[in-house]
């Protein structure tokens, strides 16, 4: 299925704030959404519809944000509101059709796609989405006709199909259908570019979509060090699949009641995170919209557990027994569906990442959270490694070696994450990156960094600038010859600063971070100068899409 579209403001400049202008909040929300900052986008769309309750485009955009978070019902509600206030908007019907299809309500998906086509006969997304719905119903001729129309309207139906499904077999397995040969031919993936050892698409003429310069740059990245899995000497692993979240994930009130009923329950109730709780750098410790503590606890009934030792837990799960027994797999009815073999990984320091994001978005957790699939975890306490993974350089590399790209969003799969090359660094360089990551993790917890008060705007700039500094150091690690030839040096001037570890800062750490930032941000400082002129290096221009 296609990714829902934002309103047509791709080239809109970043707007100037006006606290009473709904359009400003909608436009800024669209920018946040393109940057993958979904929660910030939702906050802005909330303000937009509060200021202007009939602003259809804001409802449509908020629906897109909810859909990206997997909150399909909320997305449908917002698309319906958009349609209510703009009944001739084909985009909202097409987007709602996507949501219905994700929910399995195929007839409603077809109705919405048909309405979108009636309103805009050139809406290729609607034709494609309706075709996918016809495939679910085994209406082969109708599906083929809609796929043909979508293609004639300019849509790359092959790429669109493979943005959602790895291959035809995956679609058939998920939807319990067997596609006819003629439709398989229409949706067959182009040949694999073996040079980059990944599923990059070739054109119909057999030429690679990547330029020679890009392919050479990928080779340079791979030569800089070991793949991530080899560096860690272990693979990342998927989180836990319950098979029935309603039964196994409980709120604090239920947790307390289970422990009160039988104290042994405390042994199997674990603090829990879902993919949407994982943000860049840190897991989300609170519900930012309500400022309440995280309220998710996992009933960790692993394989082989003696359920009779936990009578309150057994009683609770018993309410869902009929549903639990219908799950696939060989687990007992009271056991979780899938659990990584090494569960100690959950209690150790680790990096977490969700299955989909617009850029690499790894978070550090040292509080022992258990995490649910489709999120994954990397057992490591090396903060410098977290810094490397969250850079523009790694985002660029992964975007060109990932198996699936869905619109602006990347699909993060352990097998491909493990192939990210980790540059070979001196211990002093790793320590320096570690220090800056510590600053960022600390700042991410400070209320002034999240405040919308203009008097704290400098604090938000500070976090972004520390991100840029890490970007620069990692560029220098991947491409030392090119940067040094262009007289770009980040490590040495930062070594000269003798930056302290966070734990070494005495007194007010926030003031100390501000002082460090102001010193490095001063326009004549060597770090600021080299960051400003970084795009003069050809490879950096390629990575940052400035060529």
Image: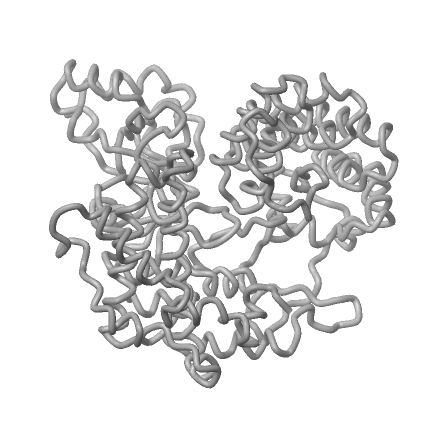
Q: Quadrant of the C terminus?
A: bottom right
Q: Is residue 346 left or right of residue 507?
A: right
Q: Nearer the viewer, residue 104 or 392?
A: 392
How many labels were placed on the picture?
0
Where's residue 43, x and y in %?
49, 29
The residue drawn where x is 73% and y is 37% is 129
Where's residue 420, x and y in %?
43, 66
Where's residue 147, x and y in %?
81, 44
* Residue 537, placed above or below residue 342: below
The residue drawn where x is 16% and y is 26% is 266
Q: Quadrant of the N terminus?
A: top right
* Residue 45, placed above or below residue 368: above
Q: Is residue 502 left or right of residue 360?
A: left
The residue drawn where x is 48% and y is 67% is 532
Q: Quadrant of residue 438?
A: bottom left
Q: Nearer the viewer, residue 207 or 134?
A: 207
Where's residue 403, x and y in %?
56, 58
Q: Nearer the viewer, residue 276 or 345?
A: 276
Q: Quadrant of residue 262?
A: top left
Give the colour scheme shown.
one colour
The residue drawn where x is 67% and y is 23% is 55
């Amino acid at each position: 299925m296609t990714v829902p579209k934002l309103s047509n403001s791709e080239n809109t400049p970043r707007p100037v704030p006006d606290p009473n202008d709904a359009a400003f909040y909608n436009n800024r929300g669209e920018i946040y959404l393109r940057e993958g900052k979904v929660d910030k986008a939702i906050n802005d769309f909330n303000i937009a519809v509060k200021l202007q309750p009939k602003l259809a485009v804001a409802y449509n955009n908020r629906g897109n944000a909810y859909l990206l978070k997997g909150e399909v019902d909320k997305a449908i509600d917002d698309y319906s509101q958009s349609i209510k206030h703009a009944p001739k908007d084909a985009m909202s019907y097409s987007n709602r059709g996507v949501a219905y299809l994700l929910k399995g309500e195929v007839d409603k998906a077809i109705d919405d796609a048909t309405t979108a086509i009636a309103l805009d006969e050139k809406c290729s997304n609607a034709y494609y989405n309706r075709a996918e719905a016809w495939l679910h119903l085994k209406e082969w001729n109708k599906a083929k006709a809609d796929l043909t129309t979508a293609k004639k309207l300019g849509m790359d139906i092959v790429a669109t199909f493979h943005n959602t499904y790895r291959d035809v077999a995956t679609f058939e397995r998920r939807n319990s259908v067997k596609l006819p040969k003629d439709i398989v031919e229409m949706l067959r993936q182009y040949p694999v570019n073996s040079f980059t050892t990944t599923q990059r698409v070739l054109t119909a003429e057999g030429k690679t979509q990547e330029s020679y310069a890009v392919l050479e740059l990928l080779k340079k990245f791979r030569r800089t060090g070991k793949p991530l899995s080899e560096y860690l000497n272990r693979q990342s692993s998927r989180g836990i699949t319950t098979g029935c979240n309603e039964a196994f994930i409980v709120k604090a009130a239920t947790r307390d009641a289970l422990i009160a009923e039988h104290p042994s329950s405390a042994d199997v109730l674990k603090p829990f995170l879902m993919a949407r709780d994982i943000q860049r750098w840190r897991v989300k410790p609170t519900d930012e919209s309500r400022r309440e503590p995280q309220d998710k606890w996992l009933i960790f009934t692993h394989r082989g557990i003696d359920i009779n030792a936990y009578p309150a837990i057994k009683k609770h799960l018993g309410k869902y027994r009929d549903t639990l027994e219908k799950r696939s797999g060989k687990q007992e009815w009271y056991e979780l569906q899938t659990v990584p073999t090494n569960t100690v990984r959950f209690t150790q320091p680790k990096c977490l990442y969700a299955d989909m994001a617009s850029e690499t978005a790894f978070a550090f957790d040292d509080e022992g959270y258990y995490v649910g699939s489709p999120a994954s975890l990397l057992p490591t306490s090396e903060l410098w490694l977290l810094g490397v993974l969250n850079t523009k350089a790694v985002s660029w590399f992964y975007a060109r070696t990932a198996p699936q790209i869905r619109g602006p969003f990347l699909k993060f799969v352990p097998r491909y994450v493990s192939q990210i090359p980790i540059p070979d660094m001196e211990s002093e360089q790793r320590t320096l990156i570690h220090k800056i990551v510590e600053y960022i993790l600390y700042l991410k917890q400070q209320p002034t960094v999240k405040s919308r008060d203009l008097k704290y705007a400098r604090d938000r700039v500070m976090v972004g600038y520390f991100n840029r500094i890490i970007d620069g150091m990692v560029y220098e690690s991947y491409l030392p010859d090119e940067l040094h030839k262009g007289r770009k040096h980040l490590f040495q001037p930062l070594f000269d600063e003798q930056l302290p570890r966070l734990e070494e800062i005495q007194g007010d750490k926030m003031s100390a971070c501000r002082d460090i930032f102001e010193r490095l941000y001063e326009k004549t400082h060597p770090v600021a100068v080299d960051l400003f002129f970084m795009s003069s290096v050809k490879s950096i221009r390629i990575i940052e899409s400035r060529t």
